[in-house]
């Protein structure tokens, strides 16, 4: 009798889980834009030309097209270029607050939706999202606009790619600004030895799971994603949801995590040197849920050039919590 009761309970719980999963998947699919509105709008953008000056354009790199925000292209080729790299789960729209001040300070600005985020730059193979491939995109975009050297700024995953760029081809980078994510060797050391960082990074395993994170993020009109991006402006939030509402977009963005596999050391073994000599600014929010103090404090031994490390009373989204301070520190750094 007891065995029968447990059997019925097990079957009941199992059926309830199946029903819940069905509801979640159905709700997620209902949130998707099967008309690909963002992709279609991107098709109509102008191809990059320095005479355009300012706006959103397309930059073609091989068989990929990157949707790109530009500013400061007024025909003066002597003006230095600043390239901005966004992270997850956002686009180049995260840099809107910085693009204007950079333009006013006399820079030409490039902020492109990176591989997986641009509608026409979403390769299907997982190895296309390895850090080495993402790094190549940075220099390819610089080549496309005629910038032999440039200032580089990144946040979150954009910082991961930026560190890789600085370490692999430092001669082309005038200055480097990393927001939120520290030197990958310092992060890797903390990940190996610091229980706090291990806890903070445990979400990565979920992001690497097939299809499940896409389902969770898109459920109920992207309520989870919206919660993750709380505090963003309506303009930015609208763009992020438009991008990720398209089938395949979230998968492409999450493939950055999946391409890491079990190795979260960010391809360090492929680098000849881990020492950064490029003038570096690092900004970190001490309330950041994903990066702890041990990783930040461990950066000193890997920075050999001019280096400024600034701790802010902020979380992960520095442009939400401390926008004026971030803009000020960035301008001070690149104007030196």
Image: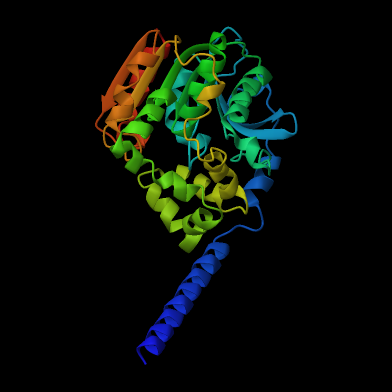
Q: Nearer the viewer, residue 216 or 220?
A: 216
User: What colouring method underlies this structural image?
Assistant: rainbow
Q: Nearer the viewer, residue 113 or 40?
A: 113
Instruction: Classify residue 252 by image quadrant.
Output: top right
Is the N terminus in the top left, top right, bottom left or bottom right quadrant?
Answer: bottom left
Residue that lies at the very extreme toward the left in this rendered image: 313
Residue at the location (62% across, 47% down)? 38
Residue 108 visible somewhere in the drawing: no
The answer to whether residue 139 is left or right of residue 155 is right
Q: Nearer the viewer, residue 83 or 185?
A: 185
Residue 190 on image: x %, y % = 34, 30
Q: Nearer the viewer, residue 55 or 185?
A: 185
Residue that lies at the very extreme toward the bottom in this rendered image: 1
Instruction: Classify residue 141 by image quadrant.
Output: top right
Residue at the location (62% across, 54% down)? 247
Instruction: Classify residue 118 by image quadrant.
Output: top right
Residue at the location (68% across, 20% down)? 144
The answer to whether residue 322 is left or right of residue 82 is left
Residue at the location (33% across, 28% down)? 295
Residue 317 on image: x %, y % = 36, 37
Is the C terminus in the top left, top right, bottom left or bottom right quadrant?
Answer: top left
Relative to 213, is 297 above or below? above
The answer to whether residue 33 is left or right of residue 175 is right
Residue that lies at the very extreme toward the right in this rendered image: 63
Residue 87 on image: x %, y % = 48, 35
């Amino acid at each position: 009798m007891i065995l029968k009761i447990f059997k019925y309970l097990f079957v009941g719980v199992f059926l309830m889980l199946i029903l819940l999963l069905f509801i979640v998947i159905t709700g997620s699919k209902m949130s998707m834009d099967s008309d690909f509105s963002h992709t279609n709008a991107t098709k109509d953008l102008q191809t990059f030309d320095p005479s355009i000056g300012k706006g959103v354009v397309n930059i073609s790199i091989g068989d990929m097209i990157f949707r790109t925000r530009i500013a400061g292209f007024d025909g003066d080729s002597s003006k230095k270029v600043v390239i901005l790299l966004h992270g997850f789960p956002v686009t180049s729209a995260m840099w809107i607050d910085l693009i204007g001040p950079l333009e006013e300070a006399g820079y030409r600005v490039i902020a492109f939706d990176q591989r997986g985020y641009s509608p026409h730059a979403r390769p299907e193979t997982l190895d296309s999202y390895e850090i080495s491939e993402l790094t190549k995109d940075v220099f390819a975009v610089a080549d496309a606009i005629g910038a032999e050297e440039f200032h580089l700024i990144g946040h979150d995953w954009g910082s991961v790619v930026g560190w890789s760029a600085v370490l692999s081809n430092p001669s082309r980078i005038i200055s480097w600004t990393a927001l939120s994510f520290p030197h990958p060797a310092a992060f890797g050391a903390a990940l190996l030895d610091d229980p706090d960082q291990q806890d903070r990074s445990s979400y990565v395993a979920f992001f690497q799971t097939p299809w499940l994170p896409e389902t969770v993020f898109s459920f109920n009109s992207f309520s989870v994603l919206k919660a993750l991006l709380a505090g963003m402006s309506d303009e930015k939030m609208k763009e992020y949801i438009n991008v990720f509402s398209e089938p395949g977009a979230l998968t492409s963005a999450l493939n950055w995590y999946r391409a890491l596999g079990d190795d979260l050391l960010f391809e360090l073994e492929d680098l000849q040197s881990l020492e950064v000599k490029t003038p570096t600014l690092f900004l970190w929010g001490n309330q950041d849920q994903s990066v702890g103090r041990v990783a930040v404090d461990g950066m000193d031994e890997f920075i050999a050039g001019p280096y400024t490390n600034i701790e802010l009373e902020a979380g992960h989204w520095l442009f939400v919590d401390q926008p004026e301070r971030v803009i000020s520190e960035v301008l001070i750094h690149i104007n030196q």
